[in-house]
Image: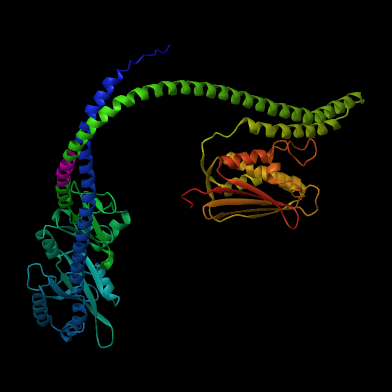
């Protein structure tokens, strides 16, 4: 049992008094906060836009710095590869003179090293020949830049030095003799760590990553050789083969991309911008705090609260004067309002009573309509099933009177039973109105299922079938079985329409036009005659002989198409027959 509780309303005067005291409080308390929140939001958007503009400028500056640093010495190896001392040493001359010459070049250009290698990768001369970690005697044939230079083109590569253990950018060019044969490779190593120092001294957060997403340089040295995303096995194999990051586990970097211009790195959410307009598919990431924008927004919100408070005080002083005059008018109006409310209550009750009578009348009309439809359906079923049942009785009686009893009526009875099943099958569709959940349906697959169902009819009738279906799926939101039911009904109607024609050709087409998926069924039958589609969709309207159907197929199909937010059209063909077209909205994924 459910319990009902009665709520006793306070006197109207008390409610009005509370409302008068609460409204100014709400005005003073809520409105300033709402204005401050709105001002803060708008100001933050403006200031954040300024921060983004400034960040884009800083990112462009750092990108230019990186590009300039990479390209500053790209010509040097090309020039050294044609130096007579380099060529002579590569072809067998003593290395001492070239060691001194390369050391002078490296010191003047502030390079880590310049060194000459034989075609098999062995270093024979270097600017650091006399240093403890000299490149002389080391073989760098495994480096990609060496293989590129040996192939006749300039090679560039960033990695940790195999000899020094220090990172650097390597540039190499082939050394050729007078006959054009490659006799060696001249290479230099450029230290880019000073870029990190520049970023760090400027208080910036900058990260430079290569095409694999591995951090090459970062304003925070602990981020170096971290991966923005887990590396695949192939990527790790290529890195290991080139010994690009020896001794590094390339663990993932602690960062999360939050949107187009937001990211969280090292536990802090910041502005995040990137540029990939760098050589070797490198990407430069720039992070900036939005604290300046937040601070300025709070200042703007505070100023708005002060101005709003002043306006509210002035408004309240003026409002007090108006309230005094309003109170005098309200006393007289209250009497009139009470009388109007009493009259309105009577009118409302009368209208409710009228609405209840109208609702009962509508229910009675609906029940009467349903009873009429059921009567018509029962009459049609009785008429359609009466003849097959009578025929069955006659055949059975004839079979019983023969001696011995004949088996021929068995086949005839099977055909009659099939006719009866076909008649009642359509009635079963009315029993399930199709409240199933909708899901993505491929019209091509549904048409394939429908054609499979009617294939025996096509073969039995000697019908020439021609289909034109798209190469890609045609996806709509619907119920697969009910869509197949529409297709099957249209195909069966087309086959039935061609039973008495000589030119039996059935054509099925499907496609997408803009946001609409469609399919057509064309036949060479007797056409629509003088009827239009609206008439053919009426239940129990059929052009077929008695016992061949109840005229429910198009009515069912029209209802299903309407459930799927589509439409069905039909028209006669100029060369004979009819064409039925069904259109349904495609899903957004396909559109």
The correct choice, above or below, for 472 with respect to 75 in the image is above
Question: Residue at point 18% right, 68% down?
Answer: 65
Q: How is the image coloured?
A: rainbow
Question: Residue at point 22% right, 42% down?
Answer: 35
On the question of residue 239 being in view, the answer is: yes
Asked which quadrant contains residue 320, the reply is: top left
Q: Is residue 535 left or right of residue 250?
A: right
Asked which quadrant contains residue 150, the reply is: bottom left
Question: Residue at point 19% right, 71% down?
Answer: 68
Magenta-colored stretch includes residue 271: no
Predominant SS of the magenta segment: helix
The correct choice, above or below, for 154 with respect to 133 in the image is below
The correct choice, above or below, for 84 with respect to 401 in the image is below
Magenta-colored stretch includes residue 304: yes
Q: Residue furthest bottom?
A: 178
Residue 13 or residue 417, whichever sits in front: 13
The correct choice, above or below, for 21 with respect to 283 in the image is above
Residue 179 or residue 342, whichever sits in front: 342
Please give the count of numbered marks on the rendered protein. 0
Residue 243: % across, % down: 22, 61
Residue 394: % across, % down: 87, 27
Q: Which residues are magenta?
A: 302-312
Image quadrant for the N terminus? Answer: top left
Residue 471: % across, % down: 55, 56
Residue 298: % across, % down: 16, 46
């Amino acid at each position: 049992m459910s319990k009902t509780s009665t709520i006793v309303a306070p006197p109207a005067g008390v409610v009005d008094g509370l409302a008068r005291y609460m409204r100014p409080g709400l005005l003073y308390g809520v409105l300033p906060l709402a204005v401050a929140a709105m001002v803060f939001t708008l100001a933050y958007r403006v200031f954040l836009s300024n921060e983004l503009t400034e960040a884009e400028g800083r990112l462009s500056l750092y990108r230019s710095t990186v590009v300039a640093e990479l390209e500053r010495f790209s010509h040097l190896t090309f020039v050294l590869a044609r130096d007579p001392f380099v060529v002579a040493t590569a072809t067998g001359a003593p290395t001492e003179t070239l060691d001194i010459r390369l050391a002078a070049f490296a010191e003047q250009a502030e390079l880590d090293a310049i060194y000459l290698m034989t075609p098999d990768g062995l270093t024979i001369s270097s600017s650091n020949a006399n240093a403890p970690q000299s490149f002389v005697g080391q073989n760098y044939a495994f480096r990609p830049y060496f293989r590129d230079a040996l192939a006749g083109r300039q090679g560039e590569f960033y990695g940790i030095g195999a000899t020094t253990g220090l990172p650097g950018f390597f540039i190499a060019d082939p050394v050729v003799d007078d006959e054009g044969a490659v006799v060696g490779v001249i290479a230099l190593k450029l230290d880019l760590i000073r870029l990190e120092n520049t970023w760090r001294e400027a208080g910036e957060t900058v990260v430079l990553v290569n095409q694999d997403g591995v951090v090459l340089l970062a304003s925070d040295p602990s981020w170096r050789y971290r991966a923005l995303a887990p590396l695949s096995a192939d990527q790790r194999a290529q890195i290991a083969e080139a010994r690009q990051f020896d001794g590094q586990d390339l663990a993932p970097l602690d960062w999360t991309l939050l949107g187009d211009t937001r990211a969280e790195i090292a536990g802090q959410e910041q502005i995040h911008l990137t540029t990939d307009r760098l050589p070797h598919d490198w990407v430069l990431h720039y992070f900036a705090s939005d604290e300046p924008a937040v601070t300025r927004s709070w200042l703007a919100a505070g100023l708005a609260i002060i101005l709003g408070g002043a306006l509210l005080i002035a408004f309240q002083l003026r409002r007090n004067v108006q309230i005094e005059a309003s109170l005098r008018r309200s006393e007289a109006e209250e009497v009139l309002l009470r009388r109007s409310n009493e009259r309105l209550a009577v009118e409302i009750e009368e209208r409710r009573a009228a609405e209840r009578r109208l609702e009962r009348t509508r229910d009675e009309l609906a029940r009467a309509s349903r009873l009429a439809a059921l009567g018509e359906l029962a009459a049609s079923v009785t008429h359609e099933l009466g003849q097959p049942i009578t025929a069955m009785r006659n055949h059975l009686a004839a079979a019983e009177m023969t001696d011995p009893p004949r088996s021929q009526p068995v086949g005839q009875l099977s055909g009659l039973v099939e006719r009866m099943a076909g008649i009642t099958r359509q009635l079963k569709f009315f029993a399930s109105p199709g409240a199933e959940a909708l899901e993505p349906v491929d019209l091509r697959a549904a048409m394939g299922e429908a054609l499979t169902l009617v294939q025996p009819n096509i073969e039995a009738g000697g019908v020439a079938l021609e289909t034109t279906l798209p190469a890609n799926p045609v996806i709509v939101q619907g119920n697969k079985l009910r869509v197949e039911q529409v297709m099957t009904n249209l195909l069966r109607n087309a086959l039935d329409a061609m039973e008495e024609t000589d030119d039996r050709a059935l054509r099925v087409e499907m496609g997408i036009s803009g946001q609409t998926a469609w399919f057509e069924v064309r036949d060479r039958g007797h056409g629509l005659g003088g009827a239009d589609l609206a008439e053919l969709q009426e239940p129990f309207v059929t052009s077929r002989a008695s016992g061949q159907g109840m005229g429910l197929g198009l009515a069912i199909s029209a209802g299903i198409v309407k459930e799927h937010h589509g439409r069905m059209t039909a028209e006669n063909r100029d060369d004979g027959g009819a064409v039925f077209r069904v259109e349904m909205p495609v899903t957004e994924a396909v559109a």
